[in-house]
Amino acid sequence: MTRPNDLNPWDSPRAFYGAELRGKRKAAGLSQDELGALVFCSGAYIGQMENATRRPPLEMARLLDAALHTDGILTQMCVAMEQASQHAEYFRLAAELEAMASAIYQYAPMIVPGLVQTPGYTRALIRASRPFASEEFIDKAVATRRERAQLLDRADPPEVWFIIHEIVLNTPVGEAAIMHEQLGHLVQLIEQHHVVVQVIPMSEGAHPLMDGPFKVMTFTDAPPVVYTESAYSGQLLDTPAVVAKYAKDYDLGRAVALSPDASLAMIRAAMEDFAP
């Protein structure tokens, strides 16, 4: 785990925030546990914010300002970080955690996961869901999603495992050529061992993951979290018992899905079905 004294506050806005929080806490004569008690969280969570593993949501920043009598400075810094992000407000913290994760386990019941979408697929998907969006808005969204995907090309990429439903493979998003390219891209990532994909076939019927999409993220030096999302909102869950339930559900999903090899064969077949 990164020690607070090793943290360079100029590495990132989040590191600067952590350094400021640590300095304000020490100036107030409080331990991490004591400050955590004042803002209704654990001392460990305070430590994670100080070493830049986690950035607090806006409401937590307000609580910290009130507890430390810091005249809103931590809240202002939090707002500035959020405004600098290219992601939707509800996804910003999840996107930061995704970039730091050592492993990502995601269930996608309806669409290809964002990390492995092609620009054409992303563009067609956004245009279908937001028919009145400007081209500028869509261009920005496509670029942001491509930036997220760069974590797969790192020297130390996270372990990425997807469970998708067969519906994802058979639902046309855009023209046939777009789907052919998208499924081909997914095949390439699998063959290059960047991701593992398992498919839950239609024939499986009811299965353990029918409550909706979610993503489990684990970290080398921090507790795991779960991210769930609906159309215009998302939620990060870090209660250990809740995270454990999602992890168990994911394991059950892997058990009923096709094997990685059989899944790859199904993806290839679907790709050929969309061949121009």
Image: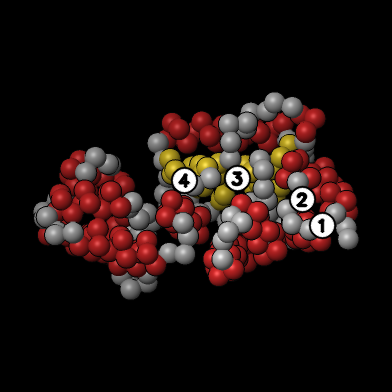
Q: Disc 3 versus disc 2: distance between alpha carbons?
A: 21 Å
**Is the residue 128 above or below the residue 76 in the image?**
above
Q: Residues within 10 Å of mark 4 (few under 14, many from 20)?
A: few
Q: Work out whether mark 3 precedes mark 4 in sequence or the reverse, and give the earlier one.
A: 3
Q: Work out whether mark 2 precedes mark 4 in sequence or the reverse, and give the earlier one.
A: 2
Q: Are marks 4 and 1 in contact (CB under 8 Å)?
A: no
Secondary structure type for disc 2? loop
Residue type of the residue flagged with mark 4? Ser
Residue type of the residue flagged with mark 2? Pro
Q: What number is the disc on residue 176?
A: 1
Residue at 20% from the left image edge and 62% from the top image edge: 73
Residue type of the residue flagged with mark 3? Gln
Q: Disc 2 versus disc 1: distance between alpha carbons?
A: 7 Å
The residue where tag 4 is placed is 233
Can you tell which of label 3 and label 4 is closer to the viewer? 4
Q: Residues within 10 Å of mark 2 (few under 14, many from 20)?
A: some
Residue at 59% from the left image edge and 55% from the top image edge: 130
